[in-house]
Amino acid sequence: MTSNILCLPFRQSSSLALSDAIKRYISNKYDQHPDMFKQDLRVIDALRRDAVHVSEPHTSGIKKIAAYAAQLSWMGGKFPIDIGADFTWYPALGYNTDRPISQDNLKFELANVLYNLAALYSQLAISSNRSTTEGLRSACNYFCLAAGVLSHIKTEIVPQMRSTPPEDMDEATLESLVQLMLAQGQECFWQKAVMDGYKDASIAKLAAKVSDFYGAAGNWGVKSEAISSEWIHHATAKHHHFVAAAQYRQACDCLEKRKYGEEIARLRDSIVCVNEALKEARYLNRVVLGDLNGLKNKVTEDLKRAEKDNDLIYLNPVPPKSELKILERAEMAVAKVPKEVAEPAAFIGDHGEFGPPLFAKLVPFAVHVAASIYEERRDRLVNTNIIDELEVLTTKIHDTLRSLNLPGSLQALEKPLGLPPSLTSHAEEIRQADALRRLERSFSDTARLKASDRATFEEGREFLQSEASENQRLLTKYGTDRWSRADSKSAAPKLYAQVDEIDGYLKSAANSDEIVVSKFRECEDMLRILSGSDRDIGEFVPSSRRVTITPKLEGEVSRLRDCVTEVSRLESRRRRKIEALREKARKDDINDSILSEAARLEREFPSQTMVPAHFEDFFEKRLEKYDSDLEALKSEAEEQDRLTARLQEANASFVAARKGDTSSREREQALQRLENAYFKYKEIVNNLEVGRKFYNDLAKIVGKFRDGCKAFLYERQEEAARLESDLSIPSLSSLSIGHHAPPPAQPYQSSNDNYAPSSHQQTYSPAPAPPADNIPRPLVDTRPAPRPYANQEIPAPIPTRSPVAPMQSPPPMMPTTWDPAMGIKFGAPASSSNPAPNPNNPNSRAPQNTTGQAPNPNPNPNPNPNQGWSGQTAATWDPSKGFKFG
């Protein structure tokens, strides 16, 4: 039924087994079995089915939609927004209502469900009995609730979607709808005030605020791609209508207060505003148009009366509009968010209106995220802040030993023949570890991981390049004026930033890999010797002659040996400490503790959605157990500095005591090279382990990058297909309103100037063109164009005939009484194929030209004077043929 207010249509959704997606997600991501939640899975499917099938304005639908929305809000704390369910919804507004939108996003589902709740409130307002004050109060309340739900979607739900909202849920569209709902709620209250007989001044304030709301709705609607032109024209007309109504009511108040000049000024302004509203008449329904015409008639009558009375009686000056006081506003319509939408947790519980919370026994997703965050922080603290620092200290002391040529110089002096015990143990360790093959396998595995990461990264970059080249092709094809969507880098700035970031990671890792390989090449020969038998090592290490050790030298040797032994003990103790620290981190199971903390948070803050940030204090307290290890690191560094100083001092004394002895120099160098190769091997193993971990972590990053690029490519392809489809519709300037048909056949006209057919000549003129707003507009524009056929097929152009030159009016008929001056013309012979028309038979006349071409006024080009009217040769007059007067 036609009404002077608008309601929101419902959004439609495709059927979906949400329980299947939830079951799969629990199986893949959680440690709990989905069979634990059979009842919850059945309930969630039933709730969705009931909510999406609400299509009638009945109050029972409020609970159905609100209950499903409340459970979705609760589930947001248990699951991530992407659980593997493609929620498909059809837009309710705009020009693409037949194109479904699918997103794997719980917040997208919640936004659509709440939109339907707002639509239901608006339709309940329309169905209220607005002929009574109670019905108007109810309608006003429903409109305020609809505005509140839409405002909640705009401020709370859409920002959490983490994706581009549909075009009918962007900021401009939602704000326009909020203002429209408030305008209609305020209008209902204004109408109630009129029915209740409020004072004119109060009614004027209410009407002025109605006008403000409608003006804001129209302004935001112009910025939206989804608000139709009919609604924009409706809001514009209503804006001017209520400005006029406010001025009229204020004029009535002026009359009561005997301000006759101001009364006339306000009535005149009211007429101007009504006329502004009537400019939209072609777009308005009959109810709105009737309201405007009724107001115009009333204001016109009052203005005539006021001007007459003032001219004859009061003689008050009429102030200009600029001197009129601006009308005050009385705002009675306020957006009200329903409590079941603002605080859904209050309605969920064992005795709650919406039933018990679903999946309550499932560990919240925020807890899983928080546990992952803690593990990441713990590992970073242990590995980076402690273990890596200890490894750096170990590397420093190895560098110091290498620079002092230790322990090779001691070993060559103490054991001039055979192999030192420490070298023998190192060689045995190398052989048992199969060091060379282990390193080769590690290099191969690292290269394979690196190649896989690089291939995944290049695949993602190719997706971006493909999208960019396709967008450039379409930009070249349509030009910047028509192809106005954002370029590739502006559409996906994060992805393009990741390109440089990941490429930097790979280049830095490649440089590190080259350094590790060069380390291996430097010590590869020595490692091959260490991997051989003791005999092979003995052949490499030359023997030296026994040196006479003086008491002084013996003391320096003993002192240096003690320092080297102390260094070896420090290194062994450090290795044990590292292993103990790693074991401590492995046993640091946070699951039970974090579940207890989550339960405490749920008890203390039941209405608050749990997020990982709530566990920050818990994290800090939990990580305090590693403070002792951080303190031990500092003492370890201080101890090493003291030991290094002693070692350097003892070595300096040892070198001074051996000054001039070069008998064991070659053996010393050989032993030192083997010792250096052993320590280099340990360093390379550690480097390769770090590299393997790095490439495994990078694999997750490039995998997400590749998936993001792929999704971006598909999204842009769909968008481009829609835009191309829209651009394929011809513009108004190229639309042909009618088909040019061939000129209609003209009646046959006799060569006899004295004869004309008795039938009236028909003249065809082009059919009037339909109004511009009945022509489908192109869908790509800076703002929505009028389109009443949004849900229909585009009407075919109306065929019209081409205009033809008007035929000459027939000459006046000659008198039927014969005059001798007229002469006599004889009829055609009986054998003529075109018999002359019988003047006594009105149905007998010259044959019509059916060829569609203009008749030849002189069919016979041979101007033979002996030929008569019919173009046949003159014959002897037959009395039976009669004669005809011209």
Image (spheres, helix red, strand yellow):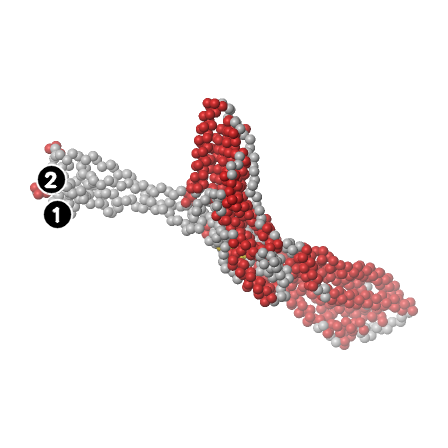
Name the foreground residue: 418 vs 752. 752
> For the point 79% across and 67% down, which residue is it?
572
Q: Where is residue 741 shown, x and y percent of the image?
A: 31, 46
- Would you name the residue on which mark 1 appears? 831
Instruction: Report the number of numbered marks.
Output: 2
Which kind of residue does numbered mark 1 sit on?
Answer: Ser
Q: In which quarter of the image is the C terminus?
A: top left
- Disc marking residue 194: none
User: Which one is in front in this view, the residue at disc 1 or the one at disc 2?
Assistant: 2
Quadrant in which residue 365 is drawn = bottom right
At which x and y percent is residue 752? 18, 39
| CB atoms of marks 1 and 2 within 8 Å | no
The amino acid beneath tag 2 is Phe
Residue 883 numbered tag: 2
Distance, label 1 to label 2, CA atoms, is 17 Å
Q: Residue at x 61, y 59 (%)?
A: 350
Q: Which residue is drawn at 16% across and 43% down?
A: 841
Q: Is residue 232 above or below residue 616?
A: above
Local crowd size for mark 1, using a 10 Å CA cut-off: few (<14), some (14–19), many (≥20): few
